[in-house]
Amino acid sequence: MAEPGVQVSRQELLEAGVGAERAARLVERAGELLAGGSPSGDRSAAEHCWSELSRSLLTPEVPFDAHRLLHERIFSDRDPAAGPAPAWLPSAAEIQASNLQAMMRARGCATYRELFDWSVANRMEFWRTMVERLGIRFAQPYAAIADLEDLRAPRWFPGARLNIAESCFAAPPEAPAIIHQPEGGSLATMTGAELRGLAGRVANGLNAAGYRAGDAIAIYLPMTAESVAIYLGIVLAGCTAVGIADSFAADEIRIRLRITGARAIFTQDEMLRGGKALPLYDKVIEADAPAAIVLGCGGRRAAVNRAGDLNWEDFLSDDAAFAPVACEPDAPSNILFSSGTTGEPKAIPWTHATPIKCAADGWLHQDIHPGDVAAWPTSLGWMMGPWLIYASLVNGAAMALFDGAPTGREFGEFVQRAGVTMLGVVPSLVRAWRRSGCMTGLDWSAIRAFSSTGEPSNAEDYLFLMALAGYRPVIEYCGGTEIGGGYITGTVIQPAAPTVCTTPSLGLDFLILDDDGRPAANGEVFLRPPSIGLSTSLLNQDHHAVYFDDAPRAGGSVPLRRHGDQIEQLAGGGYRIHGRVDDTMNLGGIKVSSVEIERLLNSVVGVAETAAVAVQPQAGGPSRLVIFAALFEGHEFAEGELLRTLQDAIRRRLNPLFRIHEVVQVAALPRTASNKTMRRVLRASYAAPGGTS
């Protein structure tokens, strides 16, 4: 039966900036589609209407206000029990071409749910299947997939030896491995053979300099073709790569070098961002780092200012041939750090088995195929840097690396020229693109899927993102460094609604529990081990105490692993991330997440971004809601108007009982290296002497 929907008038579309002829055609076609119903029993008339319009008439040239208006009106009669309205629905051809459908055919699964249920009920068989599909290379075969004597710390591939970097060179040697471009420079390509040769020269250079398997070697570099080769060379040599975000100051570098006991560090003299030269090597010296190998920005020879440091050119071996060092599966290959918004960051070792999770998620959920081009603005100090390496190269795809700020049009033009097929983003980046309009008019038609991680997203921003590429799905992807990938995500064979995850990651499920440990629709996430990727140790904390102590058990016996996210299961079966449990506040006896408030306030006209924190008054009493707000450039509010505007939005659209105590206007919100809002820093600054309390 057709759903009547609420039509958009031609005049409304004209006011949204649509040309007269296109406006008339949109109104006419929407009416025809809604009146005609859906030819498929698995879609409503509104879903069919939106799918047809978004694939034909709603091109990127149509002003986004018209996209938003049509989506809202077409789905205005949607039954809340059906869940959030999708903005992308897969075609039959897209489903058939997906990796997931190939796996379903091989398993004889009629539905995705069947495949998921098999993956969590038969985890050893699932991971054996993935190892075979990914072509993971072993120097010595495994006796079993895992020793599960302790589910909190399983031993993967007992008896095996491997070097996970070796599995990154499965594509034909002449195929592109990295498509790269520096800010203000031109596009270049590094083949798989060239990348393998440069990684071999790095590994031989490490050995020639006296470093041996097991040594920790730090990387403090932007994400470039050379830094990828350095990373892989360290791993090939059996050493442990220590990722340090290129934005960190000397004190943060010093902490990470101390925790890991790094014996050397790769860095660059400086890097260009927005036309400005930012020093790196100077900060390495200030951090009292061990011996540095220094690259020059733009390929020039760097000036070396300390005894014992080496130029990149002097360090590199002439010998590109290197036999990978075969390691035990649980030997560390990489050490990464948690965001570290307060106190000392957790140091999380990745083993030689961990990257299998990255590659598997990329194959299953981001749908990466041989010959694809994957991009994700990131660095090797954030888990998405190594994730991109393994999710791309193990799957026979190329990665696209832009050495510069991803906030402007030059990055968008790079995405277009590089032929990116999977583009990863963080929500604040999308918001910046929308604010500036810098991506207008670009051809992103090669993109088959977006993916988003780092922090909870905003529905309106992500409808805008999907529209930029003529509507492609956004695969929400939430996990962590200590997971090696995601625990909840989406797929390219399920409808995609902005901000909504559709499924736990294959091979890993979870429970949502309330404060009393009972199943709930909205609560804290507890993972059900085992899974490849889940950490089993920390360098500077008690792993079991952090993740397992005092956590409930499933069925009274299976240990559950604390993760710390708050999520909500939605009507219709999807999920929405509400941030960290630590960022949940109690206002007037009602629990609400910071993210829920921020999602609402970020849609207020003139507001660029907000952070909501609960502050305890010095004299005691109920928590007070304080909003930190950054405004769009050129937008101002009269005294008291911003508070009244935000309070009115909360009253009308969230809860009239939530009262804003104060609005603090800031130029920008403080963020971690992985782009998460540092709410604790804001809360501490507010309560500190000289702040407001």
Image (tube, rainbow, N blue to C red):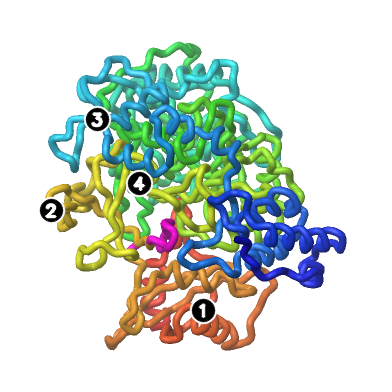
Q: In the rendered structure, which disc, 3 or 1, sits on the residue that comes first in sequence?
A: 3
Residue wearing tag 1: 653
Q: In the rendered structure, which disc, 1 or 2, sits on the residue that comes first in sequence?
A: 2
Determine whether 184 is above or below 146 in the image.
Answer: below
Residue nearest the observer in this picture, 230 or 18: 18
Q: In the rendered structure, which disc, 4 or 2, sits on the residue that comes first in sequence?
A: 4
Mark in front: 3 vs 2: 2
Furthest-right residue in this view: 21
Q: Position of residue 643 (x, y in %)?
A: 54, 84
Mark in front: 4 vs 3: 3
Q: Quadrant of the C terminus?
A: bottom left
Residue wearing tag 3: 156
Q: Which portion, as a residue range, is magenta?
A: 569-581
Task: Give the CA distance from mark 3 to mark 2.
Answer: 25 Å
Three-letter code for the amino acid on which mark 1 is drawn: Arg
Three-letter code for the amino acid on which mark 3 is drawn: Trp
User: Label 3's element?
Assistant: strand
Quadrant of residue 291 within the rendered picture: top left
Residue wearing tag 4: 337
Q: Position of residue 656 (x, y in %)?
A: 45, 86
For the point 51% across and 25% down, which residue is it? 396
Asked if disc 1 and disc 2 are in contact, CB closer than 8 Å, the reply is no
Residue nearest the observer in this picture, 543 or 392: 392
Residue wearing tag 2: 556
For the point 58% across and 39% down, which residue is it? 92
Q: In the rendered structure, which disc, 4 or 1, sits on the residue that comes first in sequence?
A: 4
Residue nearest the observer in this picture, 537 or 575: 575
